[in-house]
Structures are given as C-alpha cells and as structure tokens.
Image (cartoon, grey):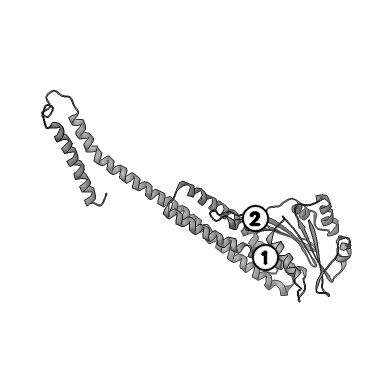
Amino acid sequence: MRTLHVFHAKQGHRIETDFSHLPKLLEDPEVTLWLDLEEPHDDEGDLDRLLREGFRFHPLAIEDTLQDYGHPKLDTYEDHYFVVLHAIDFASLALLQEVFFRTHELDMFFGERLLVTHHPAGMRSIEALRKEIETPSKTGWTAPRLFHRLLDRVVDNFIPVIEQVGETLERLEDEVIADPDPALLDRILNAKKTIFRLRRILSHQRRILESIARGHHDLIPHKQIAFFRDVYDHFVYIVDQLESYRDQVQSIMDAYLSVTSNRMNEVMKVLTQISTVMLPLTFIAGVYGMNFAHMPELHWTFGYPFAILLMLATAGGMIAYFRSRQLL
C-alpha cells in the first residue's frame, strides 16, 4: 500500500493530490513530500520504477529497500540519504514471562524536501506520525521535521519494552532464589541471547543517530540539530539500560548456578553423612556375618541383640558427634 502525503509551505497544511502530479510536486520548492510504502507491495516492479525513475534514488539503496537489508546503516548520496533502522515490535509487551524481542526494519530515503519510508504493515511509529500530521501545525511540516518526528517515535517506542525487560529480569531473579528448576535455565538463556542480539543491533543504530545528532549531514538545518540531539540522548538512555540488563542477566545466570550448586552440595552432604554412619554398621555386620567355627559369640544366646545394640550405639554416637560439630 502506498500513501502520499503532501505539505505546502505557504498553505501550512497538507494538500490532497495523487501520484500523477508527482513530477510537478518534486520541482515545486514550496512542497514537502512524504511517501509511505507499506508491505506487502502490489507490484514490486512498479515500485522499483517509481523509486528509480520518479525519485532517482541510488540503485543500491533501492535494492536494499526491496530486499530486507537487516543491518542498521546510513548511506549518503548526492541529494539524499538512505537510512536503515530497526523499530521494536510492541507484541513483546505481552510476553510477561519471557524476554523476547521482534524488530522490524524501517527503510528511509531523506532529502531536502522529501521523505520516503518503507516498512512492514502495522508499524506503530508510522501510525503515530500519520495521526500527528492530521493535526494542523503552526510551524509546518518540512522534511527534516518529519524525519525528526519519525526518529523520535521509533526511539520512544523502545522505552516501555526496555522497562518491561527490567521487570521480567527481576521476576527471573526472584524465581531463581525461590525455586531454580531446570525449565528456568532455558528462560534465562533465552533472555541472555535476546538481549545480546538487540544490543548488537542498537550499537550500530546508536552510531547512526550520533552521526545525525552531531550535525555531520548538510541536509539537516543547523537550527534543527538540537531536536535530533534530544532523540540521540533518549537512545543513549535505552542503550545504557540494555547494558545494565546484560550485566543483570549474567548475574542471574551466576545466581542460578550458585543456588543449584549449593543445593547439590546439600544433597551430597546428606549422602556423605548417611554413608559415614552406615560404614561402621556395615563393618559390624560383616564381622558377625563370618562363619568361623570358633567365634565366641556364634552360639551366644544374646549375640544377635548385642550386635543390634552395638550398631545402634555406634550410629547414635556418630550422629551426636556430627550435631556437636554442627555438621548435621
């Protein structure tokens, strides 16, 4: 599905038009265009022709758009930038017992008076921007402002998910202390794997936002750099939180191994005590189980009760000794 939003600087609001007026709109210096491309496409060949001939974007950027690139990046061309970012999927919030992320690729072509976005259907940052542009704006919608608002939405959508991750890790930590069952280990390993994957994506994304925030690109007016710097500051907070969660999930793993090890030590301690008590009893039973003809107790009437009492006295003495040494 394709949606074309057109903003006129003098009129200060959106104007209704269609793709037949696209060549004139691109030549009009008073017009800002936002073309939103939502997957799935009706005709990929027609879309390729629109991006190549209508907007004259670089062929390599178009190729990365039509085939998911999967890696955040920023490419600069003569009159436009090509930006690939990852946006978080809000479905992650429903998974209260697991740490799980699903990210969607967001491709953006950014020029002096145009913004072209390409993404899967249902991306919340895009939907939020669509609602925002429905409200009349006193300052008008320029391409840098559209670009800033979209980046701001993408970054802010990470915050509730990151906070949910923190709550999930706290629950995992409590469960590790209460009952470290084997199924819990799978959840901890899954959390660790997912956090490391997201950290790898966001580390590349951070460099892109930092480059934009530092004013290294001429298509963004200097007076608007402060807004992009604010977006970058929010993203730094998210990355810092993720770093702390990486350390936390490693601590949870160490705690799980420590608790299970302590429990195993307790089991081994009990088994060792039982074995220690039974060893002299086995010795006594072995001695009195021999069948030599001239054993003094062999034909004694009280031989059996004496052996039993000897065993009980030996076991009781050893148990008393263990308790006096706080070993039992």
Q: Amino acid at mark 2?
A: Thr
Residue beneath the point at 59% across and 53% down = 197
> Front-most of 122 and 101?
122
Labels 1 & 2 near each other (Cβ < 8 A): no
The residue under the point 59% across, 63% down is: 160
Name the foreground residue: 240 vs 252: 252
Q: Amino acid at mark 1?
A: Arg
Which quarter of the image is occupied by the N terminus? bottom right
Q: Give the x, y percent position of residue 164.
A: 56, 60
Q: Quadrant of residue 75?
A: bottom right
Apparent side of residue 303 relative to residue 39 in the rendered image (left or right): left
Q: Residue furthest top?
A: 293
Helix, strand or loop for disc 2: strand
Between the C-alphas of marks 1 and 2, the distance is: 14 Å
What residue is at 78 percent from the left and 54 percent from the top? 62
Extreme-bottom residue of the structure: 138
Residue behind mark 1? 153
Which residue is identified by label 2? 103
Q: Quadrant of residue 158?
A: bottom right
Q: Is residue 308 left or right of residue 190?
A: left
Q: Is residue 325 left or right of residue 17?
A: left
- Considering the numbered disc 1 on the image, is that residue within a helix, a strand or a loop? helix
Count residues near mark 2 (Cα–Cα under 10 Å), then give few for <14, some for 14-19, many for 20+: some
Q: Is residue 211 visible?
A: no
Indicate whether 64 appears above or below 228. above
Image x and y of residue 154, in percent: 67, 63
**Where in the figure is residue 50, as x and y percent of width and height?**
84, 56
Image location (x, y in percent) of residue 147: 73, 66
Q: Is residue 309 above or below residue 259?
A: above
